[in-house]
Amino acid sequence: AQTVTQSQPEMSVQEAETVTLSCTYDTSESDYYLFWYKQPPSRQMILVIRQEAYKQQNATENRFSVNFQKAAKSFSLKISDSQLGDAAMYFCAYRYTNAGKSTFGDGTTLTVKP
Amino acid sequence: DAGITQSPRYKITETGRQVTLMCHQTWSHSYMFWYRQDLGHGLRLIYYSAAADITDKGEVPDGYVVSRSKTENFPLTLESATRSQTSVYFCASSGGRIGNSPLHFGNGTRLTVT
């Protein structure tokens, strides 16, 4: 069974600084997708970024980028120029290409200090 | 408006009562999911559905029942609620190519079992 581990229950960052959230996963599959979701205090789950495992290039969405290390099964999220609105819980998720379900990590709560 | 809606947003019920959480999506997504979110456990999959009349168990299905007679609806029923089922419940859907498609979440239902 696939597992996703987020080893940092809580992280904090100063406004305008950069922070990296860690995620590792375990799978025997070679073709899959990885996602980062954000959950602000409103409880709404929002897609931040996605990465296809067959792509070596790291995904980027504005201030958000990932460091995808397939051999190490690592998928970290980097947030640059952190803003107060980035404060949220962040979830890493894995989805096998031919399966419907996703597996989530336990989440990392990010605090942004003004 | 297009999207995925859950109802109710908050629910308090007593131990032993049956309660149904509703989920409706307007995208005609083939996949739908029910997750529960508890402190320290991230999101855990209860049940999912690949299409109308096709459902499958997730990680924590005991005590829950689902049905999917129509593509757009995926209700979750707690047959006899227990205190351990106090949680926040999220419905989600996804469409398109299976693995690549992110999950689209509803706003969640906070269920309290007294």
Image (spheres, rainbow, N blue to C red):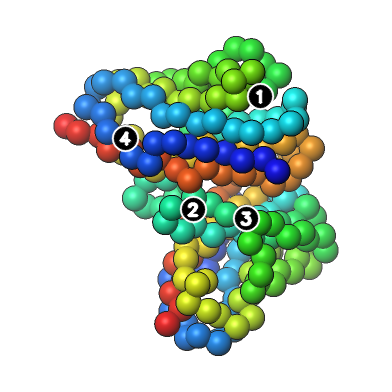
Report the residue at 51% width, 18% height from top.
Answer: A67
Is residue B38 something that shows in the picture? Answer: yes
Mark 2 and mark 4: span between their CA atoms?
17 Å
Residue A6 vs residue A20: left or right?
right
Quarter of the image that includes the N terminus of chain B: bottom right
Disc nearest the viewer among 3 and 2: 2
Disc nearest the viewer among 3 and 1: 3
Number of numbered markers = 4
The tag on residue B41 is 2
> Subunit of mark 3?
B
Residue holding disc 4: A11
Report the residue at 65% width, 50% height from top.
Answer: B93
Mark 3 and mark 2: span between their CA atoms?
11 Å
**Is disc 4 on the same chain as disc 1?**
yes
User: Of A19 and B2, which appears nearest the observer?
Assistant: A19
Residue holding disc 1: A52
User: Mark 3: which amino acid?
Assistant: Leu
| Residue A84, image x, y percentages | 25, 34
